[in-house]
Amino acid sequence: MELICILLDLHNREIIGYSAGAHKDAQLVFDAFATVEAPFDQIQIFYTDRGNEFNNMLIDEDMDVFNIRRSLSLKGCPYDNSVAEATFHLIKAEFVHRHHFRNLEELKMHLADYVNWFNNIRIHSTLGCLCPADYKKQKLTFLSENMLP
């Protein structure tokens, strides 16, 4: 069984990192971090549940190197991580349960396409019916136009 790991930007619900693999482990999370294009020094907090794939030396070292604080949800409390839980629900409904992948490589290829669609085309009601990329552009434009000289 193949698994996916998704990293979200809570500001605009953009999928900023993703990976697919055969095991739910630190390497899956590490591989998702490897796809992040944003500068790591802009990531301030890494919110996760208490899964073992997040609580290990490999991930801890990455957090330390980039001075990223970790915030763990309370045990058995999905509400602490509600944005991620809601996004995972969408991904399962729109992507995972609608496809059968013959192998890991096929999953990785389709996951990349899905992430592109999710970030650049799919509208989100919580973002004013904009896609994550357009929401971010709108906020950056607003900030640049309203910054004091």
Image (cartoon, grey):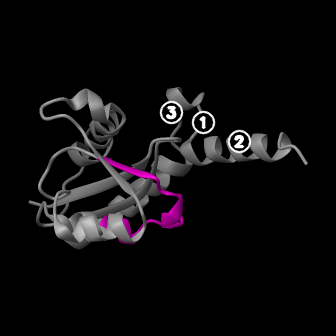
Q: Are marks 2 and 1 in contact (CB under 8 Å)?
A: yes
Q: CA distance from mark 1 to mark 3?
A: 6 Å
Q: Are marks 1 and 3 in contact (CB under 8 Å)?
A: yes
- Residue 42 in the magenta stretch? The answer is yes
23 vs 109, left or right, is: left
At horizontal 47% and vertical 42% (from top left) the residue drawn is 13
Give coordinates of residue 88: x percent, y percent: 29, 41
At horizontal 22% and vertical 66% (from top left) the residue drawn is 28
Q: Which residue is mark 1?
A: 130
Give coordinates of residue 57: x percent, y percent: 18, 69
**Dot 2, how many residues are within 10 Å of its Cα: few (below 14), some (14-19), or many (20+)?**
few
Mark 3 element type: loop
Q: CA distance from mark 3 to mark 2?
A: 14 Å
**Dot 3, how many residues are within 10 Å of its Cα: few (below 14), some (14-19), or many (20+)?**
some
Q: Which residue is mark 2?
A: 138
1 vs 105, left or right, is: left
Tell me which amino acid carries mark 3: His
* Bounds of the magenta segment: 32-47
At horizontal 34% and vertical 67% (from top left) the residue drawn is 64
Give coordinates of residue 96: x percent, y percent: 24, 48
Tell me which amino acid carries mark 2: Gln
Q: Which residue is mark 3?
A: 124
Pick whichever of labels 2 and 1 is earlier in the sequence: 1
